[in-house]
Structures are given as structure tokens and as C-alpha cells.
Amino acid sequence: MDYSVILRPVLDTMTWLLPAMLLVGLLKSPWAKGHIGELLVRLFAHWQLDKHTYRRLHNVTLNTPDGTTQIDHVFLSPYGIFVLETKNMSGWIFGSEKQAQWTQKFYKRTFKFQNPLRQNYKHLKALEATLGVNPEHLHSVITFVGGSSFKTEVPANVTQGIGFIRYIQSFQQPVFSAAEVDAMLHALQTGRRAPSLATQREHVQNLKRRSDPTAERQCPKCGSALLIRTVKSGAKAGSQFWGCSGFPRCRTVQNL
């Protein structure tokens, strides 16, 4: 019996089915979803925000005292600096401004993720240090793409889809001159880390190190090593924290 007659249709099907399955799996990965979300925001901004008024940089990696921080989008304008964090998520979103973690509910599954407002706060502080600007002129903006819906009340700067465009355009009071915007754009272009695979790998390593409570850390004020110390008395006796090895000359402390 000639089995090739039976096997040929199966093999022909597999030649396109396997690549299709791999592609679907890749598109569902967090890495791909993140990049797709950022690409959508780029397209929205390209269509809706005047490029001469709103100067933009994407995927900006800046040095910080504890490593690096990576910003999805920065829009520099006479009306302020807008720092945009993108979330490509579906399902129901629950969270408030003060919660450390927000919740995504997708069908019967529930996932926790970092409050994006807190996540973006570090981005704002890095930009403030790099540009030396008044923090009042730095604006945090969060946008959710991917068909999610908010099930709790969120601040005005947490938006969906192209809602971030309306939020950015709601600022109409000039605070920077055109020359100042150009100077800040140049400062970011020269001060950012090169957008490369090496930069991305180093940033991922920094994230892993910061999430490891036992990893070595450096004091952001004096550069000495931070050590894990234990509270010996009081209401918090027994709890641990990071303390500068330069104590008492340096009194920097961080939560463990």
C-alpha cells in the first residue's frame, strides 16, 4: 500500500500549521504584546499629535542610581513633558491610585500587576534628574490598549486607546519656549542609553537584580554598599531593611 498518498496531505498541512501555531504563540507572549502596544501608541501619536509641537522619543533607557529605567514614550512640548506608559491588556481592570498592585480579570483567571502610576513615577524622577526641570511640568500618562475596560474609578491620566491624545492636548498653557524644548530633546538624545539589544539585556538584568531581596545594592547617595539590617527595638523590631554601610556618615535606608 502506498502510504505517501495518505501522508502527503498531512505533511502539506503541517508545513503551514506549525509556523502558524508558532506565530500565534509568539504574538501572545508578553514581549510581543508589549511591543505591539507601543507600536499602536506610536501610530496614534503620529496621526493625532502635531510632530512640530510634540517632539517624541520612544523606548528611552536612562541610567538611575540602582541601574536603569526604561520609558515607553516621551513627548516634549511647550505645554509640558508627557511621560507615557503603555499597557496592552484585555479583560477587566481593577485598581486605584494608591494601590501597590492592580488586578486584571480575564474570564475566570485573575492576574496581579504593578500599579502603572507607581511604575511611571520612577520614569518621571529619572527625567527630572536628567533634564533638571520643575517636576510640575512633568506629566504621567497611562494608556491601556487591547480592549480592556476599567471596573473601578481611575484618575484622568489613566486612559484607554487614543484617550491619551485628549489628555495631552488638554494642557494648553505654555511653560517652555521652543528653544527649551529643542534643548531638552537634545539632552535626552545624548543622555539616553543606545537603543540596542545589549541595553535591553542589561535593563532586564537590572530588573531581576532589583527584584532579588538578597542581591547587592549600591547607596544612591554616597555609592557605598547597602547592607541588610534588622530593627532591634520598637514596634518594627525584627523587620529588615537596607541600610548604608557608611552609617552614621550616611543614613540612607530603603525598604527590603
Image (cartoon, helix red, strand yellow):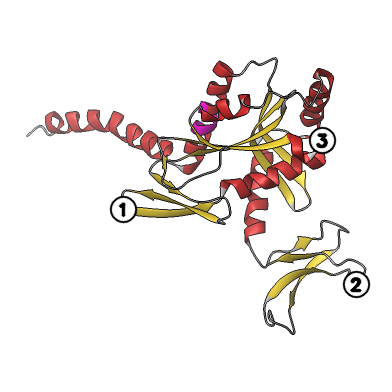
Label 3, on which residue?
131
Question: Amino acid type of disc 3?
Answer: Leu
Q: Residue flagged by tag 2: what amino acid is it?
A: Pro
Identify the residue at the far front of this view. Answer: 173
Q: Position of residue 148 (x, y in %)?
A: 41, 39
Q: Which mark is residue 21?
A: none
Q: Tell me which numbered mark, 1 or 3, is placed earlier along the sequence.
A: 1
Q: Gap between marks 1 and 2, in whole Å? A: 52 Å
Asked which secondary structure carries label 3, the reply is helix
Mark 1 is surrounded, within 10 Å at the Cα level, by few (under 14), some (14 to 19) or many (20 or more) other residues, namely few
Q: Residue placed farthest to the right in the image?
A: 249
Earlier residue among tags 2 and 3: 3
Q: Earlier in the sequence, mark 1 or mark 2?
A: 1
Image x and y of residue 87, in percent: 51, 39
Q: Which mark is residue 108?
A: 1
> Residue 90 is drawn in which quadrant?
top left
The magenta segment: 36-40
- Pinpoint residue 63: horizontal percent, then vertical percent: 76, 44
Residue 5 part of the magenta-drawn span: no
Label 2 neighbour load within 10 Å: few <14, some 14-19, many 20+: few
Local secondary structure at mark 2: loop
Give the number of callouts: 3
Task: Estimate the x, y position of residue 2 in percent, counting from the top left.
Answer: 10, 32
Q: CA distance from mark 2 to mark 3?
A: 32 Å
Q: Which residue is mark 2?
A: 248
Looking at the rendered structure, the kind of residue marked 1 is Lys
